[in-house]
Image (spheres, rainbow, N blue to C red):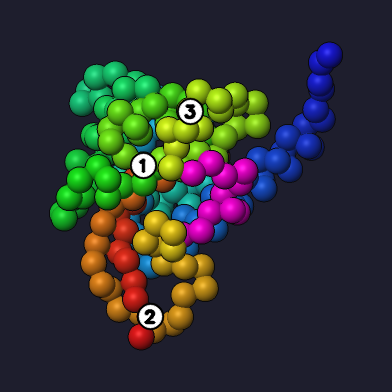
Amino acid sequence: MRLVLHESVIEKYVKEMLARAEKLVRHLHCHGVLIAVAKGSSEKKYDLKITHHKELFSLFSHVVLASDDPEVRQGKPCPDVFTVCAKRFPSPLPASPSNVLVFEDASNGVEAAVAAGIPCVLVPDVNLDITKVKDKAAEVLKSLEDFVPEKYGLPTYDVAKALTVVHCSQVMLISRSYLLHHVKVSCYHNI
């Protein structure tokens, strides 16, 4: 059996994915969370992918592209792209990899996060067989829409207007829409 999808179906799927990722990125950014991209591709491919999303990607503090970065010696499933990305955040750096969270859509990304000692939320590609990595992920979600930020010490989507910063940690985010983000997270407390 073969499946042929009309371009409009694919376009709608990509738009829905991007909308979910954008909601999370903007939410974290508006709460002072620093975000960076860590991607396995080259700069040329990356630039092509973000062409129509430059404003959204301007919210990221830095980009690490494994194919072009001399500090990234090996691609996924090796942890290099995550460890390099984490090191490039402004101080304070994460106290330990366990203070980081990765969102990933592929097996190699989950393996890389685990190899780096970083917890990973898996939001699998619809074609991904997750049997080999589902037990390695901290959580498996069907969609970014199912993500509950406060479960990981992040500000809730309906956080009150009055907030105080309690402490800082680090989070790394990756999503299906080619957003691989390393995030500096401030944990908030309602007053």
Locate residue 104, reporting x and y percent.
Answer: 47, 37
Amino acid type, residue under disc 2 in the picture? Asn
Label 3, on which residue?
Answer: 133
Residue 105: image tag? none
Which residue extends farthest front? 135
Which image quarter is the N terminus in?
top right
Identified at 59% across, 24% down, the residue is 129
Local crowd size for mark 2, using a 10 Å CA cut-off: few (<14), some (14–19), many (≥20): few
Identified at 65% across, 26% down, the residue is 127
Which residue extends farthest top? 1
Which span of residues is magenta-colored?
A: 139-149
State how far apart marks 3 and 1 are (Cα).
12 Å
Q: Is residue 140 magenta?
A: yes
Label 2, on which residue?
Answer: 190
Write down the quadrant of residue 79 in the picture.
top left
Secondary structure of residue under mark 3: loop
Q: Is residue 32 magenta?
A: no
Locate residue 58, reporting x and y percent.
Answer: 41, 52
Locate residue 141, reporting x and y percent.
Answer: 57, 44
| Pointer 1 with pointer 2, Cβ within 8 A | no
Identified at 35% across, 33% down, the residue is 113
Earlier in the chain: of badge 3 and badge 1, it is 1
Locate residue 160, reporting x and y percent.
Answer: 46, 80
Local crowd size for mark 3, using a 10 Å CA cut-off: few (<14), some (14–19), many (≥20): some
Secondary structure of residue under mark 1: loop
Label 1, on which residue?
Answer: 119
Q: Is residue 175 above or below residue 164?
A: above
